[in-house]
Each structure stands twice: as C-alpha cells, then as structure tokens.
Amino acid sequence: MSTATTQQPAAAPQLASPGPPVRALIALARVLVGWVLFWAGLDKILGLGFPTEDGSAVIDGVSATEGYLTHGLDPDSLAADVLGPLSGNPVADVLYLAGTFGAGLALILGVCVRLAGAGGAVLFLSLWFSSFPLEYNPVVDEHLFYAAALALLVALDAGRYYGLASWWRGLPIVRNAPLLG
C-alpha cells in the first residue's frame, strides 16, 4: 500500500507588518506628497505668490486652469490639442482644485487616502502628459514619480500610519461608502 502525499497549493506570501521606522517613513511620504498637492491648491485659491501672483487667484475671480492650459502648454503638442479646450472650464477648475487642495488635505490628515491618492495620481499623470516634450529626460519627470508614489501610498493603505484613517473609517457615511475609506 502506497501513501501518496497530497500537496496543498502554496498560500500567497503575506507582507510583514512594517515596524515603527517604516510606518513613520510611509506617513512622512504621505504628508510630503499631500503638502505638494495642498500647497498648489491653496496658492491657486489665495494667490500667495508661490507661483500664483496676487490678483491671479481663484479668490480674485480668475480660473484655476486658464493660465496653465492657455500659456503653459507647448502649442504644437498633443497635450495642447487635448487639454487646451479645458482652459477656464468650471468643471476642470473644480477637478483641479479637488485634486490639489482637497486631495492634499486628505493625504496630510490620512483620510480618504484611496480616493485622494487616485485623484492626485490622475492629476500628476495629466501634468506629466502636458509636459511633453520633457526637458531633461525623454520619459520620466517628477510628475510620473509623484503619480507612482501616490499609487504606492494607496497600496500601502498609508492613512493607517500616524493618520486619522481609523477614526475616519468609523464614521457612518464612510462605513457605507468604502471608496471614501
């Protein structure tokens, strides 16, 4: 009588929970990328001079997208044909401010990281696309790096590290809408 052994399929490898130094670095990356986005939106809204000049802000009645999409794109690029018509469009303005100010604030606080990270990544991919031809490298610039960093922060569920994710996810509206978690 032979005894055949039945092999069980190998379980998927599980990542170890990161230790405190790694959790702190994940949180720091989340806050830093969040600040980049938050500041871009805050400056665009208030015209703080970095780079939006006084009198050129949303609070002054100026479109959030018109300046860049009208004057910042290479007129001979594909991006000018695709993105140029969105210049001054109120929906584009709201999406830009949601992707900068809103997503940045959410990332800083560590809430709604999935949606904020996805929105921020889409914004950075759009900025990467609009930068062609790139100045220093034929493919990669800082926008692509930020988009990849945001995707990683989403994958790591970065809001749970020194953020308000646990409290946020306990709110009834968030429990009923997992995308907001």
Image: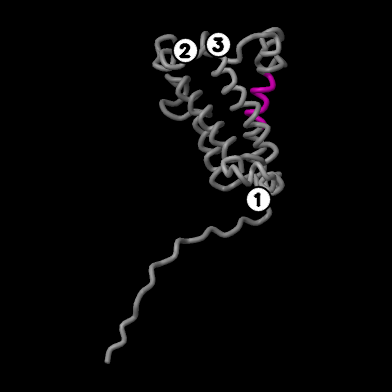
**Which numbered tag is attached to residue 88?**
3
At label 3, the amino acid type is Gly
| Residue in the picture at 51% in, 9% down | 70
Q: Which residues are magenta?
A: 35-43
Tag 1 residue: 23
In the image: residue 8, left or right of residue 73: left
Prevailing SS of the magenta stretch = helix
Q: Earlier in the sequence, mark 1 or mark 2?
A: 1
Judging depth in this view, the residue of 112 and 10 nearest the camera is 112
| Residue in the picture at 42% in, 16% down | 82
- The Cα–Cα distance between marks 1 and 2, rounded to whole angstroms, is 41 Å
Horizontal and vertical percent for residue 15?
Answer: 53, 58
Judging depth in this view, the residue of 34 and 110 nearest the camera is 110
Crowd rating for badge 3 (residues with CA inside 10 Å; few <14, some 14–19, many 20+): some
Judging depth in this view, the residue of 170 and 133 nearest the camera is 170
Secondary structure of the residue carrying tag 1 is helix
Crowd rating for badge 2 (residues with CA inside 10 Å; few <14, some 14–19, many 20+): many
In front of the other: label 2 or label 3? 3
In front of the other: label 3 or label 1? 3
Residue at the left extreme, as displayed? 1
In what quadrant of the picture does the N terminus appear? bottom left
**Which numbered tag is attached to residue 140?**
none
- The Cα–Cα distance between marks 2 and 3, rounded to whole angstroms, is 9 Å
At label 1, the amino acid type is Arg
Q: Earlier in the sequence, mark 3 or mark 1?
A: 1
